[in-house]
Image (cartoon, rainbow, N blue to C red):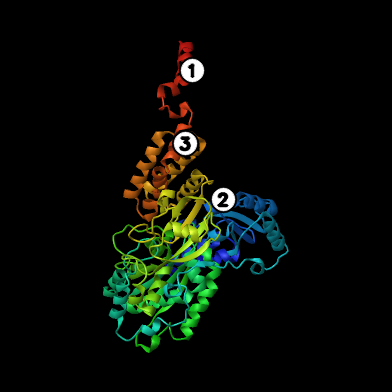
C-alpha cells in the first residue's frame, strides 16, 4: 500500500463501519510500516473521520453565520429532540449521530445539513421531524435528500457572458495542435488570467514554471476544496459545467507536459462525486483523456478524484499536497513553490476550479475577446456567490469593475450595513464604501459576498468568524494557534460587556503578529476582518467600550487581588506565634 492511498483507505473504513476501528489502524500502520500513533495523528486532523462508533445516519449541521441568522439554534434543537441525541457527542445511538460543521457550500439555502453527505436544505423544525421519521422508517436517504440547484441569478449581456454561455464538450480542446504549447500559453498570458482562488497569481507564469521544469514527472491539481464560509461558486461550476473545468486541466497538462492530474474534492461536495466521475469517463471515451489524446503522440493525461476529509486549511496549496500524499494537511514552510517541489517532490501546478474553467474559455474564445470585457488590470468576468440578507441569493457572473452598490441592487439586499468580501479571511466594508468596484484596481474578491443588514449584530458575526479560525487552525505555529484563541476571547469580552480600550488595541497588536509571523495564509489572514471591523465600525466598538461599567476599565490591581489571601495567611501566622 502506498502512503498516497491513506485518505482513500481511511474513507473505506469510515464508510464501512461509520468510524475507524482500532484493527483498521493496526492494519494500515503495518502496511505502511509506520507507527499507529502516526496514523492516529492523520485521522485526528480531519473533521469527518471518527474514532468512536457512530449511528447509521451521521448528521452534520452547518453552523456558519448565515445559518445562525436563519434559525440554526431552532434546527439544532429540533434534531436533538427528534433523535434523542446531543450534538458533538457519541451517544451510542445505533441510528443517529449529530455534529456541527462549518460552511458546507449551501449558504444560499440555509439552514442546511449533510446526512451521510447527502444535502438537506431550507430546514425547518417541521422538516427535521419529517426527515427523522422517514429515516427511522428506513426510507432511502437519496430519495428524501434535496438536489441543491445552484441558482444562477445573473449573467452579463449574452455577448459578455463567459462562464455560463453554452458549452459543448471539446470546444476548447480543438485549439490544441501538435507543438503549439507556446501559443496556448501566450494566449493565457495575453488574457491576464490570474488564480481565482484568492491569491491572484499569474496563471501563465505558474504554468510556464512547470513547463520549464526539468522534472521528469509533473502533476496538475484542481483545488476543489472550497472551504471559505459563504463561498459556493466553484460548486456551481462543478455541478453545471464540470467539463469546462476538466478541459482547463487538459490544456494545462498539454502546455506543461504533465501526465497525471487530481481533483481534490472537499468531502462536503461528495454528492458531486458521481457526476465528476461520469464526466471523466465521457472524456475518456471521446479520446480527450487517456493516451495519445486528440491523436497527438505522447500526449497522455489521466485524472483521478481524491476526496478530502474536512479541513479548511487544505485549501492552501501546500497543505492540499500534504493531504494528497497521505499526511496531515499542514502547510509546508514556503521554501519552494509547488512548481519546483510539489506532489511527491515533483513539479506541480495547483489551480482552483474557476481558474481552470476560465483557462478553457480563454482558449476557446480567444484572448482578444476576453480583453474587451472588464477593467484594465482585470479581464473578463468573475463568478461571485452572494448570500445573507438578500432576496436573491445565489450565483452572479459579473464583469470585473462592477460596484458593490450594483451587486446589492441586483441581489435585492435589504438595509445593507456590513458586507463581508471573500469570506471571514477577506475584507469587511461599511456603507460608505458601497461605491467600490470588484477588480484588481480596487476591491479584490476571491468569490463570495455576505450581506448583513443594520439589524444584525456585528459582534455575533465576528464571534462566529473567530471561533471558526480557532477551530480550523492546524496548531503548527504559535502565532496562529494562540492568536486565534486570544482574538476569540477578546470578542467574548466585548459580547459580555467587559472589554476595555486596551482590548481593542491588543486585537490590532495580535493581528499584526499573526500577519507577519504565521506559517501560512490561514494565520496571516485570520485577523484581517476583525482588525478592519474595529477601524471601519469605530463608533460601534467605542460605544461597546463606553458602556462597560467603571470596574471594567480599571487596570488589574495585584495588591488588591491578593489582599484577602494575605490577610488569611498573616492571621494564621500570628495565631501560630
Q: Is residue 183 above or below residue 94?
A: below
SS for callout 2: loop
Position of residue 267 measured from the top left corner of the image (x, y, whole percent): 51, 64
Number of other residues with Cα within 10 Å of mark 3, as a class: few under 14, some 14 to 19, many 20 or more: some
Quarter of the rendering containing residue 508: top left
**Left-right relation of 59 to 367:** right
Judging depth in this view, the residue of 472 and 194 nearest the camera is 194
Judging depth in this view, the residue of 113 and 504 nearest the camera is 504
Label 2 vs label 1: CA separation?
A: 50 Å
Residue at the farthest bottom position: 295
Position of residue 404 measured from the top left corner of the image (x, y, whole percent): 43, 57
Quarter of the image with the N terminus is bottom left
Judging depth in this view, the residue of 366 and 409 nearest the camera is 409
Q: Which mark is residue 69?
A: 2
Residue 135 visible, this orientation: yes
Label 2 vs label 3: CA separation?
A: 22 Å
Disc 3 designates what residue? 544
Q: Nearer the viewer, mark 1 or mark 3?
A: 3
Judging depth in this view, the residue of 161 and 3 nearest the camera is 161
Quarter of the rendering containing residue 534: top left
Q: Residue at x 30, y 83 (%)?
A: 180
Number of other residues with Cα within 10 Å of mark 2, as a class: few under 14, some 14 to 19, many 20 or more: some
Q: Earlier in the sequence, mark 1 or mark 3?
A: 3
Q: Residue at x 38, y 72 (%)?
A: 220
Q: Is residue 305 above or below residue 97?
A: below
Question: Contact, CB < 8 Å: mark 2 with mark 3?
Answer: no
SS for callout 1: helix
SS for callout 3: helix
Q: Which mark is residue 568?
A: 1
Q: Nearer the viewer, mark 2 or mark 1?
A: 2
Label 1 vs label 3: CA separation?
A: 38 Å
Amino acid at each position: 500500500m502506498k502512503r498516497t492511498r491513506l485518505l482513500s483507505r481511511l474513507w473505506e473504513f469510515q464508510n464501512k463501519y461509520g468510524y475507524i476501528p482500532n484493527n483498521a489502524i493496526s492494519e494500515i500502520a503495518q502496511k505502511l510500516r509506520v507507527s499507529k500513533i502516526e496514523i492516529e495523528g492523520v485521522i485526528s486532523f480531519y473533521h469527518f473521520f471518527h474514532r468512536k462508533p457512530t449511528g447509521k445516519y451521521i448528521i452534520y449541521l452547518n453552523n456558519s453565520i448565515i445559518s445562525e441568522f436563519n434559525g440554526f439554534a431552532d434546527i439544532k434543537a429540533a434534531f436533538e429532540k427528534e433523535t434523542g441525541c446531543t450534538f458533538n457527542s457519541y451517544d451510542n445511538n445505533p441510528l443517529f449521530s449529530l455534529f456541527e460543521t462549518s460552511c458546507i457550500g449551501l449558504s444560499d439555502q440555509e439552514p442546511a445539513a449533510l446526512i451521510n453527505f447527502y444535502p438537506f436544505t431550507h430546514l425547518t423544525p417541521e422538516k427535521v421531524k419529517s426527515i427523522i421519521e422517514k429515516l427511522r422508517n428506513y426510507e432511502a436517504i437519496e430519495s428524501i435528500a434535496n438536489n441543491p440547484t445552484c441558482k444562477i441569478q445573473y449573467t452579463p449581456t449574452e455577448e459578455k457572458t463567459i462562464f455560463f454561455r453554452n458549452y459543448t464538450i471539446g470546444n476548447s480542446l480543438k485549439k490544441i495542435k501538435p507543438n503549439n504549447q507556446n501559443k496556448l500559453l501566450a494566449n493565457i498570458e495575453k488574457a491576464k488570467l490570474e488564480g481565482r482562488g484568492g491569491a491572484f497569481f499569474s496563471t501563465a507564469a505558474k504554468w510556464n514554471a512547470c513547463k520549464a521544469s526539468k522534472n521528469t514527472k509533473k502533476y496538475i491539481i484542481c483545488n476543489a476544496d472550497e472551504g471559505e464560509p459563504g463561498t459556493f461558486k466553484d460548486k456551481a461550476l462543478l455541478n453545471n459545467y464540470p467539463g469546462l473545468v476538466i478541459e482547463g486541466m487538459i490544456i494545462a497538462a498539454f502546455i506543461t507536459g504533465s501526465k497525471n492530474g487530481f481533483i481534490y474534492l472537499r468531502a462536503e461536495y461528495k454528492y458531486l462525486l458521481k457526476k465528476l466521475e461520469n464526466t471523466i469517463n465521457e472524456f475518456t471515451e471521446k479520446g480527450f483523456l487517456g493516451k495519445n489524446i486528440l491523436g497527438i503522440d505522447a500526449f497522455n493525461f489521466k485524472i483521478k478524484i481524491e476526496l478530502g476529509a474536512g479541513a479548511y486549511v487544505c485549501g492552501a496549496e501546500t497543505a492540499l499536497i500534504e493531504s494528497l500524499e497521505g499526511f496531515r494537511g499542514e502547510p509546508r514552510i514556503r521554501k519552494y513553490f509547488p512548481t519546483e517541489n510539489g506532489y511527491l517532490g515533483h513539479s506541480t501546478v495547483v489551480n482552483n476550479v474557476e481558474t481552470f474553467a476560465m483557462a478553457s474559455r480563454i482558449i476557446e474564445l480567444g484572448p482578444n475577446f476576453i480583453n474587451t470585457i472588464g477593467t484594465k488590470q482585470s479581464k473578463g468576468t468573475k463568478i461571485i456567490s452572494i448570500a445573507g440578507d438578500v432576496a436573491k441569493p445565489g450565483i452572479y457572473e459579473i464583469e470585473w469593475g462592477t460596484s458593490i452598490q450594483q451587486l446589492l441592487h441586483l441581489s435585492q439586499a435589504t438595509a445593507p450595513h456590513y458586507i463581508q468580501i471573500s469570506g471571514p479571511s477577506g475584507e469587511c466594508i461599511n456603507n460608505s464604501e458601497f461605491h467600490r468596484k470588484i477588480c484588481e484596481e480596487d476591491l479584490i474578491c476571491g468569490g463570495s459576498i455576505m450581506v448583513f443588514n443594520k439589524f444584525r449584530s456585528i459582534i455575533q458575526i465576528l464571534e462566529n468568524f473567530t471561533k471558526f479560525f480557532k477551530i480550523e487552525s492546524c496548531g503548527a505555529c504559535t502565532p496562529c494557534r494562540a492568536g486565534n484563541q486570544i482574538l476569540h476571547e477578546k470578542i467574548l469580552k466585548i459580547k459580555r460587556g467587559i472589554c476595555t480600550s486596551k482590548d481593542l488595541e491588543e486585537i490590532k497588536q495580535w493581528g499584526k503578529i499573526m500577519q507577519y509571523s504565521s506559517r501560512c495564509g490561514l494565520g496571516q489572514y485570520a485577523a484581517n476582518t476583525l482588525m478592519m471591523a474595529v477601524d471601519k465600525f469605530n463608533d460601534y466598538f467605542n460605544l461597546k467600550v463606553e458602556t462597560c461599567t467603571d470596574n471594567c476599565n480599571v487596570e488589574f490591581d495585584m495588591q488588591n487581588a491578593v489582599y484577602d489571601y494575605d490577610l488569611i495567611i498573616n492571621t494564621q501566622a500570628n495565631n501560630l506565634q
